[in-house]
Image (spheres, rainbow, N blue to C red):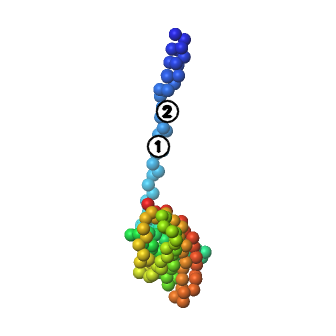
Amino acid sequence: MALILVLAGPLGAQYAPMPQPPAPAPAAPSVAVPKGKDESKSALPAAKIEGVVIARADGRWLGLALEGNNFKLHFYDKDKKTVKPDAARASVRWNPVGKTGELRTVLNPAGDTLVSPLFVAPPLTFRVFLTLLSAEDQVLETYIVEMRGP
């Protein structure tokens, strides 16, 4: 009989009522914008860099993405707004998963981006060695980027 009471005691503790979460805080009163103020500037979403974000030494940004299984390099200013490329082209090399050796391609201008003609086969998880080149084929900048695709 004592054994039954010992076992029944802990069962009651398993079904104790759960504490209720605290009530949500009341909403802050809305603030009216004076007539002379521009609402569109405050309502703009934060700038988003496409692909892997690369910070440059001068405060500007790069975004290396795999779009349609091709490399695309986007250039951004200090405010993370898209700008024209300041490099004539870029060179990319990587070691694909499941293959021996490395693959290389050149990213050429296409509008406001640099795009590779080479199709990148999945899996899209590898280290990329990126080199920005001038029109005279001088190395401007180099980066090592970890790509983590689906």
User: Which residue is depicted at the point 52% across and 71% down?
Assistant: 101
User: Which residue is depicted at the point 54% across and 14% down?
Assistant: 3
Task: Inspect this view and state whether residue 76 appears.
Answer: no
Q: Is residue 61 above or below residue 150?
A: below
The residue that label 2 is drawn on is: 19
Q: Nearer the viewer, mark 2 or mark 1?
A: 2
Q: Inspect the image, locate mark 1, and give the three-letter code of the amino acid beneath it.
A: Pro
Q: Is residue 148 above or below residue 63?
A: above
Q: Is residue 27 above or below residue 41?
A: above
Q: Inspect the image, locate mark 2, and give the three-letter code of the amino acid beneath it.
A: Pro
Camera-side residue of 44 and 5? 5
Query: Of helix, strand and loop, which one carries label 2?
Result: loop
The image shows residue 50 at horizontal and vertical percentages of: 46, 68
Query: Of helix, strand and loop, which one carries label 1?
Result: loop
The image shows residue 130 at horizontal and vertical percentages of: 54, 75
Question: Considering only order in the chain, which callout, 1 or 2, is on the residue closer to the N terminus?
Answer: 2
The residue that label 1 is drawn on is: 24
Q: Which residue is outermost to the bottom?
A: 136
Q: Which mark is residue 4?
A: none
